[in-house]
């Protein structure tokens, strides 16, 4: 049984930083492209970042590029999202996801497994 479990998010002040993690089990982690998505109330799920199996190639969404960094540790079956210079508009529920496709994808439908999500709130 595949499980993706995100760490607890939290409340952060504008300009602050937060690191999310996602623990994967029940799958051969190194064989999956991993991604982070987020969803704010009343909005569609938004692509945040994705990273290839090796960890050498990664891609971030326009709204977070330069502030957020996705990374992975295949030895520990862990995915991370370092979020810096947080803004109020970053407030959302954040999800990690795993994809069997071998390419980076920004489309939620390309991901096979999802975590339960974690709330991140940025207060101004």
Image (cartoon, rainbow, N blue to C red):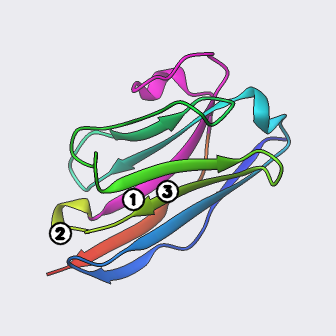
Point out the stretch of residues depicted in magenta.
Answer: 91-113
22 left or right, relative to 63: right
Residue furthest to the front in view is 56
Give how far apart the Cα atoms at labels 2 and 3 are: 17 Å
- Residue located 25% across and 56% down the image: 41
- Which residue, given by chain and number where applicable, does mark 2 sit on? 88
- Residue located 39% across and 59% down the image: 93
- Residue located 83% across and 49% down the image: 75
Give how far apart the Cα atoms at labels 3 and 1 are: 13 Å
Do the numbered discs 3 and 1 sit on residues whose CB atoms are within 8 Å? no
Of residues 44 and 85, the one drawn nearer to the viewer in this rendering:
85
Give how far apart the Cα atoms at labels 2 and 1 are: 13 Å
Of residues 61 and 115, the one drawn nearer to the viewer in this rendering:
61
- Residue located 77% across and 34% down the image: 30
Query: Whole-percent x and y of residue 25?
Result: 82, 48
- Which residue, given by chain and number where applicable, does mark 1 sit on? 93
Query: Whole-percent x and y of residue 70?
Result: 49, 48
């Amino acid at each position: 049984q595949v499980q993706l479990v995100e760490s607890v998010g939290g409340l952060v002040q504008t300009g602050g930083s937060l690191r999310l993690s996602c623990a994967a089990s029940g799958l051969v982690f190194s064989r999956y492209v991993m991604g982070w998505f987020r969803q704010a109330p009343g909005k569609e799920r938004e692509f945040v970042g994705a990273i290839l199996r090796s960890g050498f190639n990664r891609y971030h969404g326009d709204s977070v590029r330069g502030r957020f960094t996705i990374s992975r540790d295949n030895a520990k079956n862990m995915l991370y999202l370092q979020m810096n210079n947080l803004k109020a508009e970053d407030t959302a529920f954040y999800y990690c996801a795993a994809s069997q496709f071998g390419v980076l994808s920004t489309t939620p439908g390309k991901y096979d497994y999802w975590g339960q999500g974690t709330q991140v709130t940025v207060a101004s």
